[in-house]
Amino acid sequence: MGRETVQEWLDRSNRHAMVLIERQARTATGLIPFLGAGISMAFGYKNWGDLLLNATPPALKRKMAGLLERGKYEEAAESLLKRFGPDGFQDIVATAAGDHVLANSEFRSGTVSLLPLLGGGPAITTNFDRVLEKGFAVNGAPFEAVISGPRPDQIVDALHSNEHALIKLHGDWQDRVGRTFTKSDYDANYGLPDARNKRELLESVERLLFSSRSLLFIGASLAEDRTVKMLKKVHAEYAAIRHFAIVPVPDKKKELAVREAHFGECGVVPLWYQPTKTKGHGDCIEELLQQIIERSSVQTLRVASNDKSKASSSTRSAVPPFTLFATPDPAGSSSSEASKPADGDLTAHFDRIARQIEDGRITFFLGAAIHAPTRLLASDFYQTLASIFDCDALVREQFAVSQYIADLHGRDALDHEIKKLFEYTTLVRRETHEFFASWSSFNSKSGVPLPYPTIFTTNYDCVLEETLSDADLPFHLFSYQASGTHAGLFYHRSPDDGLRIIERPENIRSLAPGFVVVKLNGGIDYRKEIPETFVNTRLDYWDLASRIPRVFPQAISQVLSNTQLLFLGHGLAAQDVEATIRFAHQEHRGPRSWAVTTGDQDRRYWNQCGIEIVNQTVASYVQRLQSRLVGRK
């Protein structure tokens, strides 16, 4: 084996760091973000050196540059304090760090927008500006308190109570009394070696901070200053002290070993990034921070793999060679009616749907009628359960059947019978499944492949997943857990075969390209990896409805808010479905979605909810839609 390259070493170092960061982030105390000047520079603020040099009169430029080159920032600031006096120096700070710089700033994207997702405890900074106050507030997590300067009692209380407070260790631009900037400020607030007022100084607070909580340094150079010296002292005195820092790779390879040794003396585990011409510091930091947040928000059961053989259809269990519900549907949804005419001319409707799909603005919602003519519809399903458990009198209220079974015979008995019904039912691919299997043949009018859609389904079967897998189409699978250890959460299997449990869905803000299949009511997993639970009883539906939209990963909630819904063969009436509809429509007045069904729908009710009923069989509808999408050029 050849010598390990620098890049291989950095990759291995980062994997090691991520494991430690994830473990710490998932503890009760979590990580405390410690934000340095790099965070503020993204908003137009100058770093300390440029700030001081920019405020220096021409006659002092050479002296100032010399101090800064030697890293004597305290002395450099002190020289300006002596030159301009307290009031003049305060004007320099107010001009450089004041709120006016943030007048046109955007806080809903970038690193600052992610910081509130690290946790609800304290955040720490040595910056004077108010980037963090504004950034956290705009993103829905305003600080309960802002502690400016050396306030040991307030700082210790915030740390011990895990208060959502911003600790501005070196003060605020508008508070000269609590500010730590010049050498005289540092001497006053950190104290000289013979100081008798140690309990009132920042040094004692930092000692507690660095020894009791694990920090994540972001935008901080961790150059040799008094804060870093305290880090080294604490690390030398206490075993197993560990902090983390997102830091750039040094320009010169020889400096890497020096920086690693420096971080080791501080008790800091580095997470390295390497900016490029196309990806700057901010982009790199944001990408790593997103990884930290996501990894700490899920329980990883299996890391992603590039071995596609694990996801092949060969792992499926055999389908029994007989059918329970394969009888013609007297309601008129058999294949003989696939050509049933629609209500009026739907040419304009299909044109609009095709354009929306091309723009990635349609979310599909599948119901049991996509399996017609196989009679796996709700009425047949619940009638069969009622017969098995001798409660036919309840069948008019379908959810009461399953609730009765669960209450009288237990949840395990109900789930067992549901699984048996599907084991004994031969389900084949229908027009809707083939429609999605053909996705790679669809193009926009410009010839560009269509974006992958999000597909919600309340069906328990796994025919859709098998179809996508056989078509070699990438897809995310989210399966809701109605019961068991992880009740109320989604399992997620990614296109690259990762498997995890989503514990903090609000932190899952992006997904890799691919179909997104959301099994809203749980169901069968053809690979037998995800627990097979079923939203089936009356209480199940009420409970799930109460969790919407919080239960959805943020990436999926965003899709629901920004797209229109197309229901295919769905009854609409369940509480969780209505809760999803109302969430998706909450910012939108008037008609927004469509339901394709031949069932007896309460049109007036669903029209007021923004859904237009399209009275057509699902088979004929998807066939006509598919003809619009094939070869659009």
Image (tube, grey):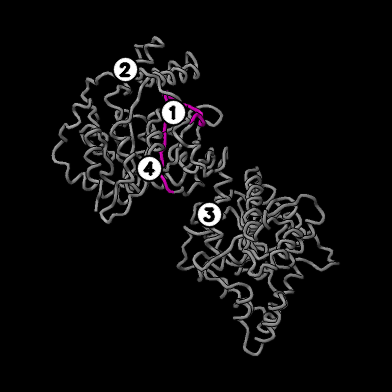
From the image, tell me which residue sits under label 4. Answer: 454
Q: Give the residue type at disc 2.
A: Arg
**Residue at position x 46%, y 43% in the image:** 495
From the image, tell me which residue sits under label 3. Answer: 114
Q: Specify the farthest residue to the right.
A: 194
65 in relation to 159, above or below: below
Name the side, left or right, on which 282 lies relative to 357: right
**Residue at position x 44%, y 21% in the image:** 419
Instruction: Provide the secondary structure element on which disc 1 rests.
Output: loop
In three-dimensional space, the C-alpha distance between marks 4 and 2, rounded to whole angstroms, equals 33 Å
Instruction: Provide the secondary structure element on which disc 3 rests.
Output: helix
Mark found first going from the N terminus, 1 or 2: 2
Mark 4 or mark 2, which is nearer to you? 4
Taking the magenta stretch, the answer to whether it contains residue 486 is no
Residue 523: numbered disc = 1
From the image, tell me which residue sits under label 2. Answer: 396
In three-dimensional space, the C-alpha distance between marks 3 and 1, rounded to whole angstroms, equals 33 Å
